[in-house]
Amino acid sequence: MNWANRITLGRFALTVLFVVALNSSWQYARTAALVIFLIAGLTDFIDGEIARRYGLITNFGKLMDPLVDKIMVAAAFISLVPLKAVPAWAATAVVARDFLITGLRLMASAKGRILPSESLGKQKTSWQIVTIIFFLALLSIAELRHANETSTWWLRAWTEAGPILVWITVALTIYSGFLYAWRHRELISPDQ
């Protein structure tokens, strides 16, 4: 197994640690979750760079890298639901879209086709990550300042900017998924 693939598997392990930290009640757990998520995001950039630069692109990497990315984002959205950061309907929309697009790609693969990512899908992912980091950062700030400060500016950001980010992210998630499915509708045609 090459280094790019090892880093991808490491990101999966970091995702597990992230979920444990975010759902823990120990002191500074939210801050640890933020740091772990940021490190995991950095590994996504690093493994892709290593694979491209050194010609280490493998079938394992083509499958596992985007799959681990989807697991990481889904785990974050699902873990933010009980913390009242993301409504359950929004997390469901994000996870369902990724399942549907993964299913579409599997159908294409069975027919010998590869469906590449599109720029709108990459923008969707960027908005998802920004939304996750926004809430994780506010959770961390609240955790670090809670004992020392009574200022609640972060709470205003949570209640005012948070829902806007969630709506933008979900709208882009659904829109990009619909367009992607529409472009490849021949794969899901009942005649196929």
Image: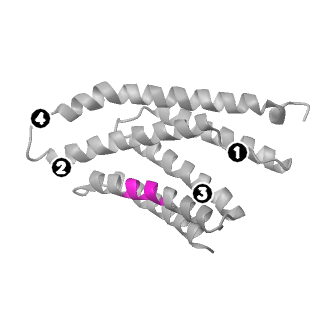
Q: Is residue 52 left or right of residue 189?
A: left
User: Mark 3 vs mark 4: which is more N-terminal?
Assistant: 3
Q: Is residue 17 left or right of residue 66?
A: left
Disc 3 to disc 1, how far (Cα)?
13 Å
Q: Position of residue 142 (x, y in %)?
A: 21, 43
* Residue for point 56% across, 72% down: 3
Residue 54 falls inside the magenta stretch: no
The residue that mark 4 highlights is 151
Q: Quadrant of the N terminus?
A: bottom right
Q: Residue at x 64, y 32 (%)?
A: 177
Task: Give the Cα separation between the discs numbered 2 and 1.
Answer: 42 Å
In the figure, is residue 71 to the left or right of 147? Answer: right
Q: Earlier in the sequence, mark 2 or mark 1?
A: 1
Q: Which residue is mark 2?
A: 144
Q: Is residue 39 magenta?
A: yes
The residue under label 1 is 116
Q: Mark 1 is on which residue type?
A: Pro
Q: Residues within 10 Å of mark 1 (few under 14, many from 20)?
A: few
User: What kind of element bears circle 3?
Assistant: helix
User: Label 2 to label 3, Cα distance in Å?
Assistant: 33 Å
